[in-house]
Image (spheres, grey):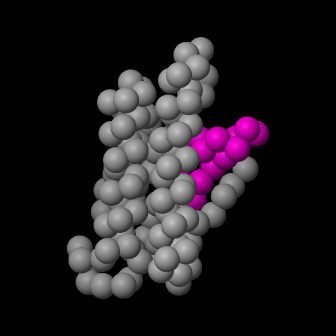
Amino acid sequence: MLTARFKLDREDRVVSFHLDGHAGTAVKGENIICAAASAIAQTAIGSLQDIARIEPDYQAEDGLICCQVSYDREDRDQLIQIASLMASVRIGCMQLEESYGSHYITCLDEY
């Protein structure tokens, strides 16, 4: 099973995400749920770099992708971009869970 953990701050902004495991719906490397979650997360990391112009703390390897950001910035537009991109990973994973079921992907919020 794929587990997606999201750490939220006091303002309900996603501070970090941690996706690990494999959904088990197909042979490793051919799993549509894992591929979708990975694409969502990797696109957000790339967008944090290219759009928000930050260098998030992240790790991506087989069966694991995680990312952490800081909201300790003064640029309001940049803060909105960071919060939106991080929230999009949570939304995308929650949509996968809703579509395919928690047997394959489970999303957990942590405070």
Quadrant in the picture for residue 35: bottom left
Does any portion of residue 41 appear in the rendered image? yes
Q: Say which of 83 and 24 sits in front.
A: 83
| Residue 9 forms part of the magenta stretch | yes
The residue depicted at 55 percent of the width and 74 percent of the height is 98
Does any portion of residue 73 appear in the rendered image? no
Q: Say which of 18 and 101 sits in front.
A: 101
Q: Is residue 95 left or right of residue 51?
A: right
Q: Quick one: which residue is furthest to the top in this view?
A: 74
The residue depicted at 73 percent of the width and 50 percent of the height is 111
Q: Where is residue 86 in the image (x, y as percent from the top left)?
A: 51, 44
Q: Position of residue 40 (x, y in %)?
A: 39, 55
Q: Quick one: which residue is furthest to the right in this view?
A: 10
Dominant secondary structure of the magenta stretch?
strand
The residue depicted at 48 percent of the width and 41 percent of the height is 85
Q: Position of residue 72 (x, y in %)?
A: 61, 22
Q: Give the range drawn in magenta.
A: 5-18
Q: Position of residue 56 (x, y in %)?
A: 43, 34
Quadrant in the picture for residue 107: bottom right
The number of numbered discs placed on residues in the rendered structure image is 0
Q: In this view, does 76 lie to the left or right of 64?
A: right
5 in relation to 54, above or below:
below
104 in relation to 76, above or below:
below
